[in-house]
Image (cartoon, coloured by chain):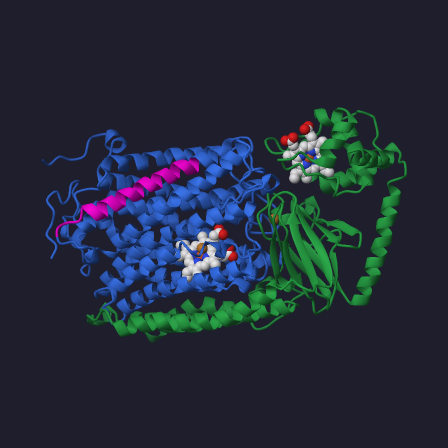
Chain colours: A green, B blue
Amino acid sequence: MVFRVKQLVVYALSPLLLLFSVGQRAYAEDAHASGWSLLNMPQGVTGVSNDIYDLHMTVVWICVWISVVVYGVMFYSMFAHRKSKGYKAANFHESTTVELLWTILPVLILVWVAFPSTKSLIELYDTSEADIDIKVTGYQWKWQYEYLGEGVEFMSELTTSESSIYNETPKTEYYLSEVNEPLVLPVGKKVRFLLTAKDVIHSWWVPDLGVKRDAVPGFINETWAKIDEPGIYRGFCAELCGKGHAFMPVVINALPEAEYETWLADKKVAAAAEREMAKKTFTLEQLMAKGEAAYNRSCASCHMANGEGIPGAFPGLKGSAIALGPVAEHLDVVVNGVSGTAMQAFGGQLSEVDLAAIITYERNAWGNDVGDMVQPLDVLKFKQGQ
Amino acid sequence: MAHGPAKGIGRWLFATNHKDIGTMYLWFSFAMFILGGSFAMIIRAELFAPGMQLVKPEFFNQMTTMHGLVMVFGAIMPAFVGLANWMIPLQIGAPDMALPRMNNLSFWILPFGFSLLASTLFMEGGAPNFGWTFYAPLSTTYAPDTVNFFIFGIHIIGASSIMGAINIIATVLNLRAPGMTMMKLPLFVWTWLITAFLLVAVMPVLAGAVTMMLMDINFGTSFFDAAGGGDPVLFQHIFWFFGHPEVYIIILPAFGVVSAIIPTFSRKPLFGYSSMVYATSAIAFLSFIVWAHHMFTTGMPIAGELYFMYATMLIAVPTGVKVFNWITTMFKGSLSFETPMLFAIAFVILFTFGGFTGLMLAVAPADIQYHDSYFVVGHFHYVMVAGAVFSMTAAVYYWLPKWSGKMYDETMGKVQFWIAFIGFNIAFIPQHFLGLAGMPRRYADYALQFTDWNMVSSIGAFMYGAAQLMFLYNVIRTIVAGKPTSVEKTWEGAEGLEWTLPTPAPFHTFSTPPEVK
Ligand code: HEM
Ligand SMILES: [Cu+2]
Ligand SMILES: [Cu+2]
């Protein structure tokens, strides 16, 4: 009998113990090492994430102690006060003292928790005096990062291949948490994030930074982080945003300040070169090749790689009146989007070269054979002409 | 005038008898439970391993959405309305519900509402894919056209709930037997009375939310569209003003059930009847003023954030009072462990665990990490499945002999319990780990570090699913071939008017009101 009760108690408490027995463990890069050991919240690499972790552990332990008492009494009765053992029921009920006690005691515990929570929240909300401002824009299904005042901006998109998602090729180490270009940040600097979205609500979450904030279309939210250690930190979109919700990870590369400055300087040079490129003229082959790559990156998630779209949701471009019609209208749809639909304005997201290449590609791929070309300069003129 | 039920299909189509309507509600909700459960099985099968195996992400989103909608509005809510129909008149000594024809209507529009909703699965564009919380603008500007069917489905389901609630309020306030004062009402009646007021208060808010969506989608308004001066976050405020009370609508009747079963099998009265009534009222009141704890990451001003944090923490107090009461009721009782009691005890254990994670979620800075992760999925399945569904299962085993005049098979009941209990924990404990480790919810596919626990969770889910089929088998077997029983008081420790009636309960009961002392 005793043995049975012990078993019961252990069984009932094991989830709690498992959940909470995990000690402090920062995890940045080796998080994926073993799935079984992922039991607790990461401590993270910012002051805020550490505070959150401490708060989390405090509440966890409070819960553990309360559950020891509550489940303890319960399991004791289940063992000791059984009818099968001939135990006769007592008949007590209502006791004002007891009832006052179990009302007031929890209130006191809650007040005790409320103090550090309030403090952390105030800290978490203090976005003043930032060293760097970064605008984060959520799109279906990628993130755009803009270094405000530096003239540097880029799209950060998933690079995991469709074929590995559909199990045709092996999955790599950072399956679904790898991007073409991570957000690069300096350590030791207070970075303010200004979040918004262009279509639906997304949510930018990096557990190691203790940051999660919704990106709401038409509004700007603020939050911040000051990273203590260099490293690569991975996160995800946390708000359901359509079919690509699981496919728009966040990757941050935190560098020592000097390295960050070098990176930023290089990035500025590259941006200038990109603007230069827009003045060049390309051949049809060049445009088609560039266009296919860019189309698959930015458009295929909705219009599909074969240009046939998804009936009822996203129109096919193969044989579409717009893709086969006048260039100006085609440009208009792609550059300005179609308001009130999932078709975004790509004018601000893609370079002139990419836009020209994609449009050329759409007009000449999958059996569309308009035969004409759109050059980056055409796109530039179209934009300026508006 | 003693007459039995009408013959043939007419008995059900034109039913005004509370027992018949209750039975229909219960079967309907079980059908929905199986439907919503099969969606869950698809979800868990897809998540068994990383990579897309069975479905496409767009269909996966339809599954999570339909699973949530069908379980909340189709399985849990109608199940408790069915239980209310059966038990409230029996427990207060009334001959029937106060508004029998409206009772018929409120049931019969439900199948239409759910047909509208489910028919979208076969339409171009597919079923709703924006989550059971249907945040704008994903559910408006970016929704498939079938969203209009969803909107009208919700309207119909909401109207049904409101009618059901009005009927319960009218019955409890007007049809109590002489001597059945308010403070003598069984707790199941009390919790349902309070739930009914919650329903009447918040279902119209939900109707308002979907109507505003309808206007935004079809008539050019911009309630939730910033480009037209609206605000997507406004949608969330409206939704959760309905949504938080909704979660208590789901759990309060479950509290009532457990408060009936635990004293019976402890052979000892409930420890603090009046404090249970006050705690229920306190929970109901607080549930109106905590809604934005679902929105800690939306960028509310800090004052709002702090207020909603404190208010939410406060809800843990009356919830604790309930748990402490059940446990002190068991303490020094004379306990036996028949199937209803097993489910009731599991309810207390697991619901309490869900309460703990609720308390954790209430701590706003920590919720920044938990929010929209699998941790939240773990939390609400502990309170909704181990809470509402376990208590519902307990209720069926507890009252089935009274309803059918047949006894269920105790061994089979216990086997089902253990499969359900173990399967449930294997399915949902790992989801807490996954959430803490950083896996967001509503993900059709995941990074490799989440593989192991997802596999475990899926195995548990299949086990839990199998337990439900076994439950169905047990119930049907009892009705068809169970051992007949005519003992009035099925359980020696049971108290209450329903146990003074013959078994099975005749078609008409309490035609002359009983005297309550
Ligand atoms: C001690 C009492 C409870 C507290 C303090 C509490 C607190 C919370 C909080 C703060 C959240 C938001 C988490 C997030 O999204 O970040 C939440 C989510 C949720 N809770 Fe509770 N909760 C409690 C009990 C319950 C009960 C009794 C139910 C229903 C039976 C319930 C059902 C839910 C549901 C369905 C969600 C998720 C909704 C969604 O986003 O889909 N909770 N809870
Ligand atoms: Cu998302
Ligand atoms: Cu809530």
Q: Is residue B464 magenta?
A: no
| Image quadrant in which the C terminus of chain B is located | bottom left
Residue B27 falls in which quadrant of the image? top left
Viewer-side residue, B183 vs A172: B183
Whole-percent x, y for residue B304 in the image: 51, 58
Q: Is residue B136 left or right of residue B354?
A: right
Q: Residue at x 19, y 70 (%)?
A: A91
**Left or right of B436 in this view: B479:** left
Residue A213 rendering spot, x and y as whole percentages: 60, 56
Quadrant for residue B365, please give it.
bottom right
Residue B164 lies, in percent from the top left, at: 30, 42
The foreground one among B278 and B231 is B231
Q: Quadrant of residue A104?
A: bottom left
- Give above or below for A123 relative to B103: below
Q: Is residue B167 magenta-colored?
A: yes
Which image quarter is the N terminus of chain B in? top left
Residue nearer the viewer, B397 or A260: A260
Please report the residue visible at 45 percent of the width from the left and 54 percent of the height from the top. B291
The range drawn in magenta is B153-178
Q: Is residue B377 visible?
A: no
Q: Position of residue A240 (x, y in %)?
A: 57, 47
Q: Main secondary structure of the magenta part?
A: helix
Is residue B398 shown left or right of residue B161?
left
Residue B95 seen in the current view: yes
Ligand number 1: quarter of image: bottom left
- Give the residue at x 86% y 36%: A377
